Image: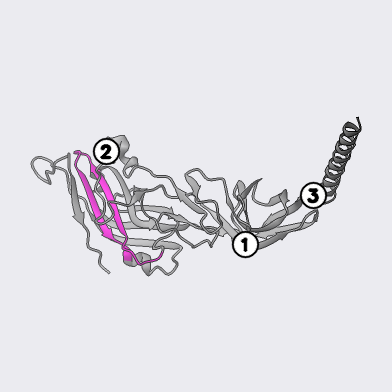
Amino acid sequence: MKKTHCFSTHMLYLTTSLLMVGCEHKELCHDHPHTTQLQVVFDWAKAPDASPKSMSLYLFPQDGGKALRYEFAGHKGGKIRVPAGHYDALCLNSDTEGIYYRNTEKRTTFEVTTRTTALLSRLSSLGVPSQNAPRAEGTKNERVALEPDRVWSDHTENIQLKKATDGQSLTLYPEISIHTCTIEIRNAENLKYVSGISASISTMAGGMLPGIGPNALSEERVTIPFGVAMSADKTTITGGIQSFGHCPSTQNSHKLVIYAVLADGSKWYYTYDVTEQFHTAPDPQHVHILLEKLPIPKPIVNGGGFDPSVDEWEDIEVDIEM
């Protein structure tokens, strides 16, 4: 009996000690919560005309933990609750459609890119397949990618958020991260015979790294297809694209290709080397390419004109007069 009594007393003491430790732990957690309130402000001083419908904020723990994402309706910001700690941050608008993110584990690897698309999707209504469509020389292995939506972004480093300290704030200054390129081809010939027309530009940046900066580009190179229009008098071609930019780390060549399908079913493509216009543009973020001549032939009429095979693409390299 004595042995049993001693064992019971020991167990009672151990149980009481454990309960005391448990209570003490709960009191500590209650007195020192692990989260804090953070006021997030998106200041649009660098893009005063921007008003995206929604914004995302990513917080990257400096200890290597999983990135935290917060979503805001509108473009002004708001209050959130965040675990206390040290973070890096980036923000960007989330009201986009063709854009997706990859390598999002770290601020420095977070990439914004676009999905793959068909090279001649704008000519699909004419029954023109994209499979085996001609490409500019040296670009066969480039992914064909959608042009991006407009993206505004900013980032910052070394944010310290303290426990149970309200009134902390974080201000970010988003700016445009997208480049534009407009195309104009004057003195185009025989546009009245064109049933469909589209274009592409090769060797553009496949993505951007907003956690490094608005002009930090990924190394992937892509071809971007886009639509063009004919003027009412059938003498001029105009069009434009948005992109992340060009030449991530080396000076590459860039080719503009115009695809034209004529009324007789023949298919023609015209290649322009527009590298010089990209590399010497006064404003690299707003490039305007002005070209002369698009030598579209007349279809066969009463035995005259060209007679190409409608099953093959006819290639014409257009020299640019500088």
Q: Residue 198: x, y in percent? A: 32, 47
Nearer to us: label 3 or label 2: 3
Q: Can you identify the residue that label 3 sits on?
A: 33
Above or below for 160 versus 224: below
Q: Residue 159: x, y in percent? A: 68, 61
- Mark 1 crowd level (few <14, some 14–19, many ≥20, 10 Å Cα): some
Residue 258 is covered by the magenta coloring: yes
Q: Residue 142: x, y in percent? A: 32, 52
Q: Say which of 104 and 302 sits in front.
A: 104
Residue type at tag 2: Val
The reply to whether callout 2 and callout 1 are in contact (CB within 8 Å) is no
Q: Can you identify the residue that label 1 sits on?
A: 156
Q: Say which of 322 and 56 sits in front.
A: 56
Q: Can you identify the residue that label 2 sits on?
A: 128
Separation of marks 3 and 2 at Cα, in angstroms: 63 Å
Q: Secondary structure under badge 1?
A: strand
